[in-house]
Image (cartoon, rainbow, N blue to C red):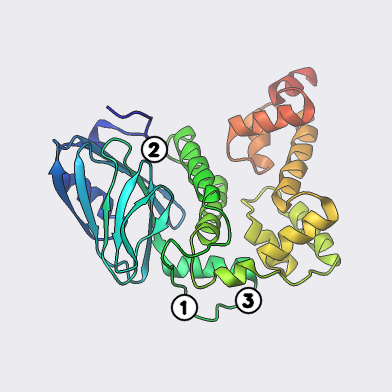
Amino acid sequence: MRCTPPPLPLTAADRSDRLDELRDSVQEVTIAHEVRRRRGQPDGAASRASVGAVNVVFVQYGADVVVDAFPTRSRFTATVPLGPMGVTMGPAVRDATMRAGFALSADEHTVMRPDPLAGALVLATGMGRLEEQLVTMTGTPARTRLRFLDPDQPAAAPPGLLDATWRLVCRTIVESGGRPAPIVERTLEEQLLTALLLSLPHTGTADLLAAPPVAPTTAVDRAMEWIEDHLDEPLTVSDVAAAAGLSTRQLQEVFRRQRGVSPMEVVRDLRLTRAHAQLRGSTSVGDVAHACGFGHLSRFASAYRDRFGELPSETLQRRR
């Protein structure tokens, strides 16, 4: 029996006592690998979800197994151990015990021994999508093809960022019944790609660590005007940055300097203000939330209560 709940919902169809079935379920949306039993009787599960271009997979074997992952080549795959995991990855990483997320090797086999009960999370996407996100974050074309490095190399941010991000993503998937609204899914995808690029070492890490060019003071005005015209759309930081002619790091920095908050905090504040006004003439909280760009009703209600001291349903009732 698992000590902690799985991060993704499980159904009876997700459970299996056959390693080949668990392997096939995982590698269908990640990369080719083999699973070999060492001790114990398998009694595991594998569940999957998609967040934009990123596949998120939870797998737990219920037995002591060895997972031999083939080189990823142009396909990016990262493993997040949910318990201590023994890892061998080429000549550089030999029998290390990993507790934080790491990228699988592009050129060598990655051999893993996941915790039988805790299992692991697997994140997979195309390398091209990560390269696009890196350019969006830095604002400059990559000098070389993106390659992820051995996990003992320095990254741009602590691994705790990736841990917090995947937990948020999985919690949102569970709360949405496995189907996040498009407006939510786009935001989650960008957050996950950004966390991967910041938390794992790669050839673009130095560019992420370098101070971004100072953005012009008029950039915030351009961004604010564009945000107000697109509040009902599924906005991401990348969307706002592109509209302002900045990288996402420049946008974050100029908003921090001029407004003391992040761009997405501004977006949320403007949406809440608009929702507060629209509830005056509406008959449905859900209609107002959707019209103001909120894709998750319960989170809208929570944010609204934090801002105005009452639930949106109470505002609606009071104004009838």
- Quarter placement of the N terminus: top left
Judge the density around disc 1: few (<14), some (14-19), many (≥20) Cα neighbours within 10 Å: few
**Neighbours of disc 2 within 10 Å: few (<14), some (14-19), many (20+):** many
- Badge 3 amino acid: Thr
- Measured Cα–Cα span from mark 2 to mark 1: 33 Å
Q: Which residue is mark 1?
A: 145
Q: Secondary structure at mark 1?
A: loop
76 to 213, vertically: above or below: above
**Real-space CA distance between mark 2 and mark 3, rounded to the nearest whole angstrom:** 36 Å
How many residues crowd mark 3 within 10 Å: few (<14), some (14–19), many (20+)? Answer: few
- Residue 58: give x, y in percent of width and height: 34, 43
- Judged from this view, the residue extending furthest toward the bottom is 143
Q: Secondary structure at mark 2?
A: loop
Determine whether the residue tagged by mark 3 lies in a helix, strand or loop: loop
Q: What residue sits right under mark 2 in the picture?
A: 8
> Residue 80 at what x, y percent from top left?
40, 49
Label 1 sits on what residue type?
Answer: Arg
Q: Quadrant of residue 275?
A: top right
Q: Is residue 68 above or below residue 301?
A: below
Q: Amino acid at mark 2?
A: Leu
Q: Along the polypeptide, which appears first: circle 3 or circle 1?
A: 3
Query: In percent of the image, x 79 and y 61: which residue is there?
Result: 254
- Mark sitting on residue 140: 3
Q: Is residue 31 above or below residue 313?
A: below
For the residues marked 3 and 1, what is the alpha-carbon distance in whole angstroms? Answer: 13 Å
**N-term-proximal mark, 2 vs 3:** 2
Q: Residue at x 77, y 44 (%)?
A: 270
Q: What percent of the width, then of the height, locates residue 208?
A: 61, 67
Residue 224 in view here: no
